Amino acid sequence: MIVLLRRLLVVQMLMLWMGGFVFYTAVVVPIGTEVLGSALEQSRITRWVSRSINLIGIATLAVLLIETACCRPARRAGIVMLVCTLSMAILTTVLIGVRNHMLTLVNFDAMVIVNREELHGWHRVYLWTISLQWAISVVYLLTMLSAWRSIDRMVAK
């Protein structure tokens, strides 16, 4: 029962973090931009959502590290899971730094972009970084599911 609850927590955290990112970018941002009238207005919401996504990511990474240690996957799967988790942790650190820098490029009180060209460049870095992080999370998920199947087969014997 403990294993099942631990696995449920891992899946739920990954869905909240990466599923939340996908839903926000695919659905909320386009609708918010249309309803609010501009990407700048939408950014008033995104600055808070991105903070939340990064905080959820930190919590998820802790859960993934625990899962990697607890599930004791085969050596190769364990290495892949650990490398993926550490890579996502590094990327989360980059995302937090880029986000914080981008916030300095917008005056939200006056709703003015201080340096549009620099902001667009850093925004591209942010989008590519979080997209890479999402791809790595898929590798982690596939490796983890494969490890779980192997472990379950061994336990069933």
Image (cartoon, helix red, strand yellow):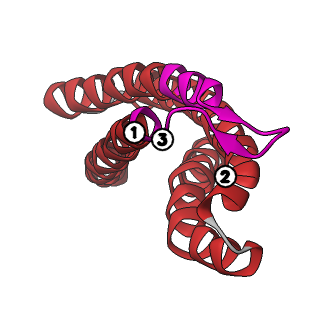
Disc number placed over residue 116 in the picture, else none: 3
Quarter residue 121 falls in: top left
| Circles 2, 3 touching at the beta carbon (< 8 Å) | no
Q: Which is more toward the observer, 143 or 89?
A: 89
Q: Residue at x 34, y 49 (%)?
A: 131
How far apart marks 2 and 3 lie (CA) works out to 13 Å
Q: Where residue 17 sits in the image (x, y, percent)?
A: 58, 49
Helix, strand, or loop for circle 1?
A: helix
Q: Is residue 116 left or right of residue 139?
A: right
Q: Nearer the viewer, residue 145 or 48?
A: 48
Q: Position of residue 58 (x, y in %)?
A: 60, 27
Using the image, tell me which numbered label, if any, was put on residue 117. Answer: 1
In this rendering, the label closer to the viewer, 2 or 1: 1
Seen at 59% across and 32% down, the residue is 114
Q: Is residue 134 above or below residue 22?
A: above
Left or right of residue 145, residue 80 in this image: left
Upstream in sequence: badge 2 or badge 3: 2
The answer to whether residue 1 shows anywhere in this view is no
Residue beneath label 2, please? 43
Check if mark 3's residue and mark 1's residue have beta carbons within 8 Å: yes
Where does residue 24 sit, x and y in percent of width and height?
60, 64
Q: Report crowding for label 3: few under 14, some 14 to 19, many 20 or more residues within 10 A (C-alpha).
A: few
Q: Which residues are magenta?
A: 96-119
Query: What amino acid type should be assigned to the residue bearing mark 3?
Result: Arg
Furthest residue in direction left, as rendered: 76
Q: Earlier in the sequence, mark 2 or mark 1?
A: 2
State which quadrant residue 129 falls in. top left
Question: What amino acid is found at the position of numbered circle 2 in the picture?
Answer: Ser
Q: Residues within 10 Å of mark 2 (few under 14, many from 20)?
A: some
**Mark 2 secondary-structure assignment:** helix
Residue in the picture at 55% in, 30% down: 102
